[in-house]
Image (cartoon, rainbow, N blue to C red):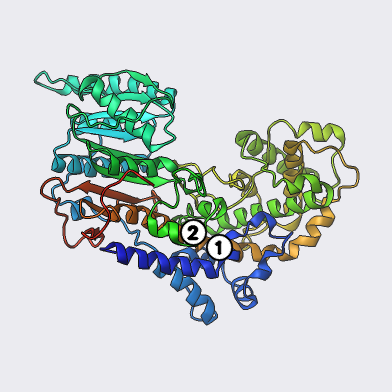
Amino acid sequence: CETAEQTREWMEAIASFLGRHRPLLEAHVVNFFKDRLWEMVDADWMECLRREPVESLLMLPSGCVQDHWPSSLQEFILTARSLVLPREQKSPQSFLPNSRVASIGTVLAQGMNSKKKHEIEALSGIVDAIARSRGAKTVVDVGSGQGYLAQALSFEYQLAVIAIDASSHHASVTNTRAERIKKHYAAKCVEKQQFKVPRTVTCHVLSSDTLAAVTLDACQDDHGEHITETNNCNQSIPQIEQPNHSIPQLVLAGLHACGDLSVNMLRVFVSCEQVQALVSVGCCYNLLSEDTDTCPGFPISKAAKSSKLVLGKSIRDLACQSAERWRNLTKEMALQNFDIHAFRAAFQMVLEKYFPEVSRLSPSIGRQGKALRRQRLRKVMESHLAMGKADDLSYPNCKEQNMNTDGSLPTEPTAPKGAVECCSNELCTGDTYSTSAVVGSSISRVNVGPSDTNLDECCKLTLFKDFTISGLGRLGCGFVEDVNLLEIWKDVQHFTEFIGPFWCLRAALGPLVETYILLDRLLFLQEQGSAVEASLFPLFDPAMSPRNMALVAWKLTGDPLEPSHDMGMYKRLPSSSVPLSNKC
């Protein structure tokens, strides 16, 4: 992938493979029973996988196969894995030999979990090395959140930072936290030193024009001398077309900037003279815009735009799957979450039979009320087990139904807990059918025997009843006397054994979709010609931070940055391409 042509060939191979498996890509597990989705998969595959231990299923997204599997199934898994970007973490020094990764102290790391600390330490070191190599002393942290990256760059690397985020609350937290950290660093310093805190800018960035204007306007205000304040902006800010030579050289940085925000960073890097380098780690592919008349978040490269491959929200959401997280799930957790899939798919059958008008609207029953849901399900399980009422699946009376419309809701599954990760430790919530897996935490309280970690059927029926009652309450469905949940569950329970294999097969395509999206972004930069160098680099440990690919780019205004030749992911851009442009 050292040239644009090689990148295009890789993307064409992925598009061809995904095109052959389009039905599996577009399938939703909520329709599993309704549409008999297991029948779309080769019968030999399903017969083989339903007999496999859960541990083998969880290794499918990682490309692991068994010798006794059908050869066509092995070929499917191995081909998919062969087209995926290598995700194993590499040392920042293998990419930039002169970079240094500073260990974040307890004061600077306050509020960070281990995942965030890992990300901030690695990313801030790369940003600092890129900034120094390009002669830039100002970094723009796009989608700064609570300012963890901005503060590490300010206090640990003494860089001026502008922190842009859509939340005024985040800006307030960033400012308060920065002042507290500043006092700590000042107390440690023997000689008097002026510590700069990140300057916060609150703005909803919906286009690259807005991001460019906000960035340059913030720099122009104080010529890089950053102060603690929050500037609010709106979409009426005009684009700054004429270069202002008083504005310092800039580096754009983003840690898991969601959806189109990461793409807008690329466009600003290309179009703005002052932006000399870019370090971007994207996420939330499900939130990317697609098929729009304006500049879409996907596709952005000319080659991808000319391709016939269209993803859509459901497939883009699949790109958030993490093979590393899948294989690190425990057997118990996987079984619990496969049960949740079954509940949601069976609930769809309830809607189809008794509330067809609601079902046609493809409703979302949400992720709200996690704590209430956890508490209520625990009480339900304890009550039914104590009273021996696990077989009582009659529809609740009006009083019971009203008690279940208090915001305590069932979940809508897409993946086992921990298998999907975007910009935080929480599961990605962008998908209409996103998983919370809170129900699983209650399921795990039941154990039918030392050799069987799954629920017995009575307990599953009990939880399905609870799931359905809450879902109907959330959707505002009226009371129906003749709803028979026992009949529906008995109709589908024989096919629940296919849910795990089906979902694991679909999840195996997730890393492939993400690779295509990332290569589209790389190719967009490669299409700018010899004035830009770009690279995709696995910066984080994928088991800890699944969205671990950093897109690093810089303009060749001087001596080009020389990465180490053994890092394996370096891409020098071809000289025979189109010039820099800010057009889509």
Residue occupying the point 47% across, 48% down: 285
Element under label 1? helix
Q: How many marks?
A: 2
Q: Amino acid at mark 2?
A: Gly
Q: Are marks 2 and 1 in contact (CB under 8 Å)?
A: yes
Which quadrant: the N terminus?
bottom left
Question: Residue lying furthest right in this view?
Answer: 481
**Residue 90 locus on image (x, y percent):** 26, 56
Q: Position of residue 238 (x, y in %)?
A: 37, 27
Q: Residues within 10 Å of mark 1 (few under 14, many from 20)?
A: many
Position of residue 471 measured from the top left corner of the image (x, y, whole percent): 73, 42
Q: Is residue 110 visible in this depiction of the protein?
A: no
Which residue: 22% across, 47% down? 554
Q: Is residue 44 above or below residue 382?
A: below
- Amino acid under label 1? Arg
Residue 75 relative to residue 156: left or right: right
Q: Which of these two is toward me, 459 or 253? A: 253
Asked if residue 211 shows in the view, the reply is yes
In the image, residue 211 above or below residue 346: above
Q: Which residue is mark 2?
A: 510
Where residue 506 is drawn, which disc sits there? 1
**In terms of image quadrants, where is residue 173?**
top left
Question: What separation in Å lies between label 2 and label 1 (alpha carbons)?
Answer: 7 Å
Q: Residue at x 40, y 51 (%)?
A: 300
